[in-house]
Amino acid sequence: INVPGAAWLGGSRWVVVAGELSEAALVGFDGTGLQVLGGTGDAELRGPFAVYRWGDTAWVADWATRRVTGWSADGRFVGSVTPPDLFRGTLPRARDAAGQFYFEIGPIQGPGGRGSRDSASLVRAAPDWSRVDTVARLSPLDVAEVNDEKGRRFERRIFSGTDTWGAFPDGTLWLARVYPNRIDLVAPNGQRSKGPALPDRIMEVSRLDRIHWLLEFPEELRGTAERLPVALVKPPFTNGFAGPDETIWLETRRAAVDSTRTYHVHDREGKLLYAVVLSGRQARVIAVGGEVLLVAEQYREGVR
């Protein structure tokens, strides 16, 4: 499923980004319907792929223009930001109340993907780019060395996990750590704290998991995919995001035969509050509003 990205703008209004369609839209569930931002093929928005909220504005990341563009709650273009070259084309994924930007900067891969063994950096930048600081590092990817007809290289293990993160309005960074399975915080002054260990059982990668994964590839590519390294166990979560009340939502991993999807909701300190369970294999939460969830679900004609 090609899951859209989304951000809540208050009330019944959301901005939804469909990267595979190269479009972003303001969606109103109050009867106002759908408004494509900028109009189809507009010069301001050519390759949108992600969105985050800052105040009452949605900021859409655009790979084609290498910038983020701001859109008001009534769908008006309000400006754009282009990061300097030192970010190597990476676009910000969050912004705090003071206007500071937050980036995830991956390591330089180098020959044979050797750089993939290093950690990605979480970087905070002042609104005028006058100050850039590394505030945290993510866990290294789980990689394995592969030697085949293409040569020797490093590949990430299939089904392995990655850390996920976000920034609260006050500039506190939260990081969901996949291997210790906990949520850490980095305060604006740099002080670090570790949340409690989270209660998730270990789940091995099964033969059925591998079969389902291989079926996602065209038949002519399955032989190549089958030779990629596979992790022994699944990560405790596969995705994460924050709600407007500063709760942290982690999408938990599941078995291949599961017909539901579960989200563990934590408070700002990383303590588990409750679980949300969605029925249907393809249903996914893509954004959290004040009292409602925005859920995307794949069906025969596409995604609704």
Image (tube, rainbow, N blue to C red):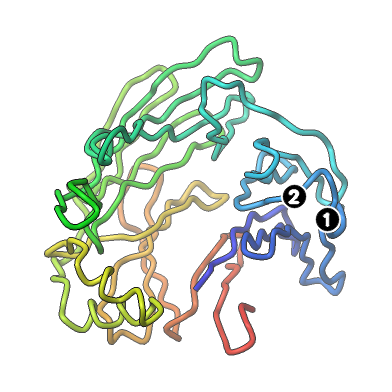
Residue sitting at x 39%, y 49%: 267
Left or right, residue 304 beside residue 79: left
Residue sitting at x 63%, y 44%: 63
Disc 2 crowd rating (10 Å Cα; few below 14, some 14-19, many 20+) is: some
> What count of labels does the image hold?
2
Left or right, residue 262 beside residue 159: right
Q: Earlier in the sequence, mark 1 or mark 2?
A: 1
Q: Where is residue 287 in the image (x, y as percent from the top left)?
A: 57, 60
Left or right, residue 238 beside residue 67: left
Residue sitting at x 49%, y 73%: 1
Q: Residue 162 carries which label?
A: none
Residue sitting at x 14%, y 53%: 147
User: Of residues 187 and 252, which is closer to you in this image?
Assistant: 252
Q: Where is residue 109 in the image (x, y as percent from the top left)?
A: 33, 35
**Figure check: 56 above or below 219:** above
Dot 2: element: loop
Q: In which quarter of the image is residue 256?
A: bottom left
Q: Where is residue 149 in the image (x, y as percent from the top left)?
A: 20, 57
Q: What amino acid is found at the position of numbered circle 1 in the picture? A: Gly
Disc 1 crowd rating (10 Å Cα; few below 14, some 14-19, many 20+) is: few
Dot 1: element: loop
The residue lying furthest to the front in this view is 149
User: Of residues 255 and 271, which is closer to you in this image?
Assistant: 255
Q: What amino acid is found at the position of numbered circle 2 in the picture? A: Arg
Q: How far apart are marks 1 and 2 (CA)?
A: 6 Å
In the rendered structure, are the residues bearing label 1 and label 2 in contact, judged by CB atoms less than 8 Å apart?
Answer: yes
Residue wearing tag 2: 46
Residue wearing tag 1: 41
